[in-house]
């Protein structure tokens, strides 16, 4: 699997100090990359140009992106290609399960492009992937899903496969949805989180936000309160980093101290787990976010 | 045996060398940060792959870098 075509020119300017990462050693044998190439699997790590890729892949972990690498929605923050998606690959669940097995993952994160072209939005393919991974590895499964256009039948299909974690990212504050998320709808995403919790309270629900798109602190507080009001268990907050110059530019680099302060507010609101920091992504160290909780307490 | 300092595949877009932390001929320790690389999305610090002397630099500030490229060599002896 090759990374996206490179931009013409690398950057000239320096980023703030806190966006500096030491490069871990340990991926000299390119184990993760070779495995993903061999099994022809897509990852969000590559497709979203994630800055944590070297670190995560050297830990032999990756976030699988199913249903192809062409998305039907044009979100302004995301570097995944958009256009006419390819046919669903029927053997993808087994290939994914094999990769999870060989990477010895105990916690497998599966996400997808948005497939508004499929009648069920790809929900049945999610279900098949969850079941295949569980059968082959016994690992916990976290799904990070699109909104399935709010279709309860599609959601039921995924929920009934009982992923340990159901993640759906709110991404940003409602005012910025049009610009950042195109055809998505804030209320629909919130309703999705509420629905999952109602249908199966034992599933841990999780959401994530990108900071630095132009949101205000008050707007953020409102979103955190909304997410808690629908029983969301885990929250991730990370810095938005524009994938290329064609994407929405970064409005502000949020310093680590602000991430800490927001995380504190979120904890007081009652999230079971909050992970916040410039390089935090919803799948970053996802295994560690969940381990203490396993399944959510339905009586909480 | 001289040990190459290789540019890893960062996955974060095109990269540029910004600064060497060590001078030519300087002793470096394995794991010590040795060169800084800029991308649009993060700044990365590449560490010395071995203890020795920074014997050669093959890339310089402002150079555009490709994955796998050799940035320099560390040797056991002073050059
Ligand atoms: S943070 Fe997530 S998307 Fe980024 S490299 Fe790690 S696993 Fe992949």
Image: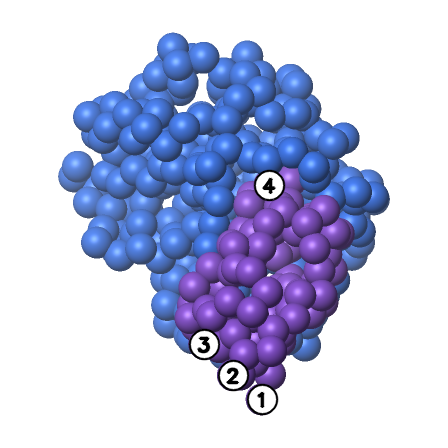
Chain colours: A blue, B purple
* Residue closest to the eye, A93 or A273: A273
Left/right placement of residue A40 relative to residue B1 reads: right
Q: Are marks 4 and 1 on the same chain?
A: yes
**Which tag, 2 or 3, sits closer to the chain's start?**
3
Q: CA distance from mark 2 to mark 3?
A: 7 Å
Q: Are marks 4 and 1 in contact (CB under 8 Å)?
A: no
Could you say which is closer to the camera, residue B41 or residue A248? Answer: B41
Q: Earlier in the sequence, mark 1 or mark 3?
A: 1
Q: Chain of mark 3?
A: B
Whichever of callouts 1 and 2 sits on the residue coming sooner in the sequence is 1
In space, the residues marked 4 and 1 are separated at their CA atoms by 35 Å
> Which label lies toward us, 2 or 3?
2
Mark 2 is surrounded, within 10 Å at the Cα level, by few (under 14), some (14 to 19) or many (20 or more) other residues, namely some
Q: Nearer the viewer, mark 4 or mark 1?
A: 1
Instruction: Give percent across and percent down for residue A279.
Output: 46, 42
User: In percent of the image, x 54 and y 79: which residue is there?
Assistant: B78
Location of residue A235 in the rendering, given as x and y in whole percent from the top left corner: 35, 36
Q: Nearer the viewer, mark 2 or mark 4?
A: 2
Q: Residue at x 47, y 50 (%)?
A: A21
Numbered label attached to residue B76:
2
Q: Which residue is mark 3?
A: B51
Name the residue nearer the viewer: B52 or A48. B52
Quadrant of residue A248 in the image?
Answer: top right
Mark 1, chain letter?
A: B
Q: Nearer the viewer, residue A169 or A153?
A: A169
Q: Which quarter of the figure has residue A242? A: top right
Q: Is residue A198 above or below residue A158?
A: above
Tell me whether circle 2 and circle 4 mark residues in contact (CB < 8 Å): no
Same chain under badges 3 and 4? The reply is: yes
Q: Which residue is mark 1?
A: B1
């Amino acid at each position: 699997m090759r990374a996206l075509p490179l931009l013409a020119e690398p950057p000239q300017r320096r980023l703030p100090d806190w966006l500096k990462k030491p490069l871990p050693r340990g991926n000299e044998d390119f184990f993760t990359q070779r495995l993903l190439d061999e099994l022809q699997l897509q990852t969000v790590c590559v497709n979203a140009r994630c800055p944590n890729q070297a670190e995560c892949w050297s830990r032999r972990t990756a976030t699988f992106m199913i249903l192809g690498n062409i998305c039907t929605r044009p979100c302004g923050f995301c570097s995944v290609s958009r256009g006419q998606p390819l046919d669903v690959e029927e053997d993808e669940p087994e290939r994914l399960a094999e990769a999870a097995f060989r990477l010895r993952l105990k916690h497998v994160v599966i996400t997808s492009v948005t497939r508004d072209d499929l009648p069920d939005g790809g929900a049945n393919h999610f279900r098949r992937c969850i079941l295949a991974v569980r059968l082959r590895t016994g690992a916990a499964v976290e799904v990070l899903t699109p909104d399935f256009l709010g279709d309860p039948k599609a959601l039921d299909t995924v929920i009934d496969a009982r992923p340990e974690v159901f993640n759906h990212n709110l991404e940003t504050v409602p005012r910025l949805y049009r610009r950042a998320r195109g055809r998505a709808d804030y209320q629909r995403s919130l309703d999705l989180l509420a629905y999952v919790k109602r249908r199966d309270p034992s599933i841990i629900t999780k959401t994530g936000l990108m900071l630095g798109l132009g949101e205000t602190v008050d707007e953020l507080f409102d979103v955190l309160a909304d997410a808690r009001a629908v029983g969301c268990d885990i929250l991730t907050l990370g810095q938005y980093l524009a994938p290329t110059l064609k994407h929405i530019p970064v409005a502000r680099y949020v310093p680590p101290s602000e991430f800490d302060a927001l995380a504190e507010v979120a904890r007081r609101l009652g999230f079971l787990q909050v992970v916040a920091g410039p390089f935090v992504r919803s799948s970053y160290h996802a295994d560690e976010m969940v381990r203490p909780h396993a399944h959510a307490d339905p009586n909480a | 045996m001289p040990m190459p300092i290789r540019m890893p595949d960062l996955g974060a877009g095109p990269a540029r060398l910004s600064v060497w932390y060590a001078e030519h001929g300087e002793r470096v320790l394995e794991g010590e940060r040795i060169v800084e690389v800029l991308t649009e999305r993060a700044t990365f610090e590449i560490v010395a792959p071995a203890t020795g002397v920074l014997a050669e630099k093959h890339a310089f500030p402002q150079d555009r870098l490709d994955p796998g490229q050799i940035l320099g060599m560390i040797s056991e002896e002073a050059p």
